[in-house]
Amino acid sequence: MAILQQILFVAALATAAWFLIRRAGLIRRAIQLGKPENRTDRPNERFSIMLRVAFGQKKMMTNLTVGLMHFVIYVGFVIVNIEVLEIVLDGILGTHRLFAPYTGAVYPFLINTFEILALGVWIVCVVFLIRRFVTKVPRFQPERHREMTRWPRTDAALILILEILLMTAFLTWNASDSVLREREVGHYGELSNVGTFVVSQFLMPLFANWSDAALVACERFTWWFHILGILFFAVYLTYSKHLHIVLAFPNTYFSDLKPKGEMKNMADITKEVQLALGIAQADPNEAPAEPGRFGARDVRDLTWKNLMDAYSCTECGRCTAACPANITGKKLSPRKIMMDTRDRLEDIQRGWQQNGPEHDDGKTLLGDYITAEEINACTTCQACVQECPVNINPLDIILQLRRYKIMEEAQAPASWNAMFSNVENNMAPWKFSPGDRFNWADQVNQ
Ligand code: SF4
Ligand code: SF4
């Protein structure tokens, strides 16, 4: 029986590892579709941003209560899963609480800490479920935000429910195990000196009338449920918005260090304008620039960091809640821009898997996923960039799509074309001759 459990365990572990490695490879390949961009300068500053924003969750703390609850769920879940190391070794070696005989008082201390954190995670998950589905925080509601359709809502609920079940299984496993140790049933009795644990002791009375056989079945079931649930969680993560648990770290490390609002192509534009005004001379020895595409039409025209941003998005909607275009009823939602970019990448991945790596589905991010109406509504105010808890920049994608629409397809709204022509002819957005610019001063002097 024990050997059968070991074989089943190794098979489950290997299956999860295979899925994980495969998914990680696909996501890496999808991100590499993006154009190159150097984000490795100033490593100390980058590391400090990652520590403060990803690990310290600095931006989440603007709402202290929610920030602290998120911190509990995140730190708690990560630390509780350190226990997985022992569970995995027990599963492979066919042992039971492998570390307990060798770690003295440290072992109960660690399990007690895990149990307190597990209880914290359990409580916060329940509160988050209530917040999302009962008190209905506006930024999660599909009536107000069309991108929050059935799947994003199901995904959010699934992960919270799964965490509640995992923590429940962990505490129930400890409780049934403690009763078996107290009764000194079989090999459980060898660890009777470990004692009971701080939270699960309150569940032990539930098992008072259970037979030994029923208790062993409960202990085995909750142990298997806990570890299989964690393996499922790890694989599911790669299909879910909860991938941010992992990607928040590299995504914040590779943050944009330039001042907000500084355009990437400013140097090229400045040069073009100087040449046009005769302020600068073209270098006759300079090789002609590669003919390229202005802006972006599809994910291959974006940078790898834009694509990593899409996989790191938590779908929290803080960007959309702060977006003036969205608040005033325009069609734009920066959260949807990130979700659409990720959907486009996932569709490309599915095409690779079904039809080979050269498959082209004929779709593009601009047009098939994101409309001109959405990107044209952006005021470039940077509020979405400021608010994002994992330093995502939806504006960069919007600007690149808009640049393509205007410069490659010459499809700007009529009012913008009038403004462009005024800037070109009058050196100002208004329809007045530059010669009349100081007319107002004549009236002041009269
Ligand atoms: S930059 Fe654009 S998308 Fe971002 S908050 Fe401002 S208007 Fe909305
Ligand atoms: S872009 Fe940032 S703020 Fe907006 S939904 Fe995604 S994680 Fe949240």
Image (spheres, rainbow, N blue to C red):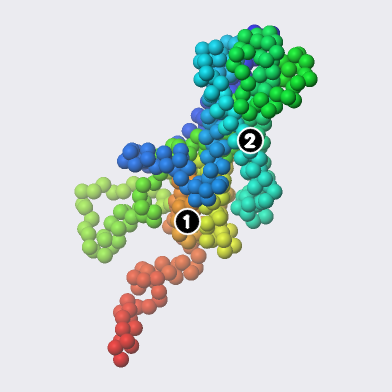
Q: Residue at x 61, y 27 (%)?
A: 198
Q: Which residue is mark 2?
A: 122
Query: Closer to the observer: label 1 or label 2?
Result: 2
248 or 421, which is in the foreground? 248
**Residue 355 seen in render:** no
Give the label on residue 383, or none: 1
- Image quarter where the C terminus lies is bottom left
Give the percent coordinates (x, y) of residue 277: 26, 65
Which three-letter amino acid code belongs to the residue tagged 1?
Ala
Q: Is residue 46 left or right of residue 158?
A: left
Number of residues whose C-alpha sits closer than 10 Å to that of mark 1, classed few (under 14), some (14–19) or many (20 or more): some
Location of residue 145 (image quadrant): bottom right
Number of residues whose C-alpha sits closer than 10 Å to that of mark 2, classed few (under 14), some (14–19) or many (20 or more): many
Which three-letter amino acid code belongs to the residue tagged 2?
Trp
Residue lying at the far bottom in this picture: please name it.
446
Q: Residue at x 31, y 41 (%)?
A: 42
Give the label on residue 434, or none: none
Give the percent coordinates (x, y) of residue 373: 55, 59
17 or 368, which is in the foreground? 17
Give the percent coordinates (x, y) of residue 345: 54, 40
> Quick check: marks 1 and 2 in contact, CB under 8 Å?
no
**Quick one: SS at disc 1?**
helix
Going from the N terminus, do you reach mark 1 or mark 2 first? 2
Location of residue 70 (image quadrant): top right
Q: Residue at x 49, y 37 (%)?
A: 247
Q: Is residue 70 left or right of residue 3?
A: left
Number of marks present in the image shown: 2
Q: Is residue 312 left or right of residue 149?
A: left
Query: Real-space Cα distance between discs 1 and 2?
Result: 33 Å
User: In the image, is the residue at mark 1 within 8 Å of ligand 1 by its beta carbon?
Assistant: yes
Image height of 58 relative to 267, above or below: above
**Quick one: SS at disc 2?**
helix
